[in-house]
Amino acid sequence: MHKQTFADAQHWPANVLAQDCPSRVILQHVTSRWGTLILIALAEDTLRFANLRRRVQGISERMLAQTLQVLESDGLVHRHAHDVVPPHVDYRLTPLGFEVAARVIDLARWIEGNLDRLKQEGQTAP
Amino acid sequence: MHKQTFADAQHWPANVLAQDCPSRVILQHVTSRWGTLILIALAEDTLRFANLRRRVQGISERMLAQTLQVLESDGLVHRHAHDVVPPHVDYRLTPLGFEVAARVIDLARWIEGNLDRLKQEGQTAP
DNA sequence: GGAAGTACCCACATAAATGTAAGTGTAGCG
DNA sequence: CGCTACACTTACATTTATGTGGGTACTTCC
């Protein structure tokens, strides 16, 4: 038996607005600068490292490698390394990855399609 | 007349994967650490500064103020200052804000509801 | 009178994210 | 042979994000 405490109430059910809710961590990964773009790119295609880098324009090798590792550790991306040389590694979304990606894409597409409705003139702070 | 160049193709239609697509900027704002949480909180209620800060647990005054300004400049949040003293300022989403918030919430809710399916053990990198 | 609340801003300091350049080992190509 | 491609990693430098503490001007509550 487990008596529910006030602290528990913050987390059950999970609530991102709660201070140390674990979902915040995943949300950070998914909504990170490159995380979003990688998910979007991989939703279209299974890609190799170099190709993925070409799709996600502007990303450095370092960030691509790092972000892929994070997404993999979350169970959103699957890394398949063929045992050959020179190396050949495929990256693709897991079923879970496709579920998040769909939502991220929905958000991105909305923004892309509503750019003209969004103000951007007096923008000083990034 | 306007002959479409290769560079144009990157931006028309808007594509977040393109290097300097303006939608990336908005995406950053919306998916920023606190931006997401503020949108989620404001989708539930119109809130005053201090109340909003209590909802978005862990945010500092500085970041709250700063992020609100960014979201306001994007046209997602509306700031209504009553001319009284002590100050009374209401923050609420614009119609546009509600549209993005809905998508952000969808993403957040999915994460909250699938925490158990997501791996988190060997997590070293944040 | 003193404390607390309101909605901030500012300067300063630190933490975190990101970029840059170089290196690794092997293979195929001209 | 020399160059390029592949998928990384590591060290170092820089940029960006975020936190902290203090201040403001005024009011209400005790």
Image (spheres, coloured by chain):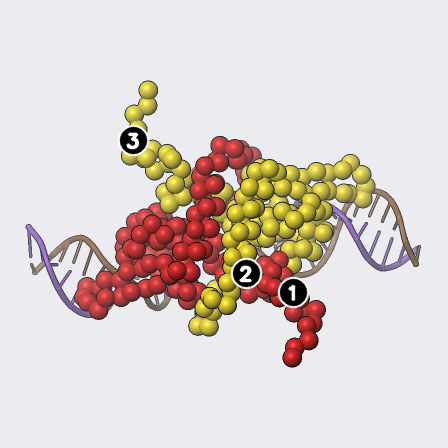
Chain colours: A red, B yellow, C purple, D brown
Query: How far is mark 3 from mark 2, CA to CA?
Result: 44 Å
Location of residue A99 (image quadrant): bottom left
Q: Residues within 10 Å of mark 2 (few under 14, many from 20)?
A: many
Foreground mark, 3 or 2, reads 2
Circles 3 and 1 in contact, beta carbons < 8 Å: no
Q: Residue at x 65, y 77 (%)?
A: A2
Residue on which disc 3 sits:
B5
Estimate the x, y position of residue D11 in percent, counting from the top left.
37, 67
Q: Nearer the viewer, residue C24 or B52?
A: B52
Instruction: Please state if C28 lies on the left or on the right of A96 as rendered.
Output: left
Q: Amino acid at mark 1?
A: Gln
Tell me whether marks 3 and 1 sit on the same chain.
no
Q: Residue at x 63, y 47 (%)?
A: B43
Residue A99: tell me if it is visible.
yes
Residue on which disc 2 sits:
B112
Q: Nearer the viewer, residue B78 or B40?
A: B40
Instruction: Please state if A24 lies on the left or on the right of A4 as rendered.
Output: left
Estimate the x, y position of residue D27 in percent, counting from the top left.
87, 44
Residue on which disc 1 sits:
A10
